[in-house]
Image: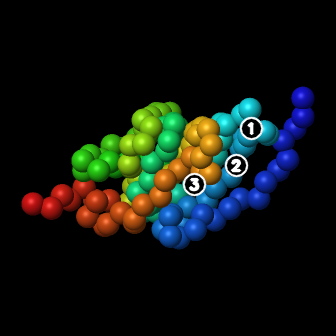
Amino acid sequence: MEIEPTRETILNPEDRFPGGVWLDLIAVPHGPEQRTTVAKVRFQPGARTAWHSHARGQYLHVTDGVARFGDRAGNIIEVHPGQTLYTPPNEQHWHAAAPGVFMEHYAILEGDDGAETPTWWGEQITDDEYNGITPG
């Protein structure tokens, strides 16, 4: 047994996390036989991710504030503290803090065998997508 090293809080890059999104890594793989990563992620009010997906899916457990999660079909789900959202493998989605509130969630995901990264990143979401406004 060993206590994991303390890691610095990271401000995520604006090109994938506009608006101020902070990351604390909780657990990372020690070797190729492991592939689970757990992180605490904190969003400033209105901060969001770009479109992305995960090869093996992802669990997001909200601990504070109000989270918004959106998919390519235009669905937006609000998730509250104590609730866990699951996104299936390769489902394109985004996460965000609702307007006017900070939001914190734990992200749990697995790396994909042979893949350089477990996450595919796409374009920024629009304000209309964030607000649930669909063209039409």
Please report whichever mark, 3 or 2, sits nearer to the chain's N-terminal start: 2
- Identify whether 73 is placed above or below 126: above
Q: Is residue 99 left or right of residue 81?
A: left
Q: Position of residue 54 (x, y in %)?
A: 49, 44
Measure how far apart labels 3 and 2 are at the Cα level.
12 Å
Q: Most extreme residue toward the top, as rendered?
A: 1
Q: Which mark is residue 32?
A: 1
Q: Is residue 113 left or right of residue 64?
A: right
Amino acid carrying mark 3 in the image: Arg
Residue 101 in sight: no
Q: Position of residue 23 (x, y in %)?
A: 64, 55
Q: Which quadrant, please, contains the N terminus?
A: top right
Give the number of the mark in front: 3 or 1. Answer: 1
Amino acid carrying mark 2 in the image: Leu
Label 3: few (<14), some (14–19) or many (≥20) C-alpha neighbours in 10 Å: many
**Which residue appears at 82% of the width and 50% of the height?**
6
Is residue 94 or residue 89 the one in the foreground?
89
Please report whichever mark, 2 or 1, sits nearer to the chain's N-terminal start: 2
Tag 3 residue? 42
Q: Helix, strand, or loop for circle 2?
A: strand
Measure how far apart labels 3 and 1 are at the Cα level.
28 Å
Is residue 128 or residue 87 the one in the foreground?
87
Tag 2 residue? 25
Q: Is residue 117 left or right of residue 8?
A: left
Q: Position of residue 76 (x, y in %)?
A: 30, 47
Q: Is residue 24 left or right of residue 1?
A: left
Q: Most extreme residue toward the right, as rendered?
A: 2
Q: Helix, strand, or loop for circle 3?
A: strand
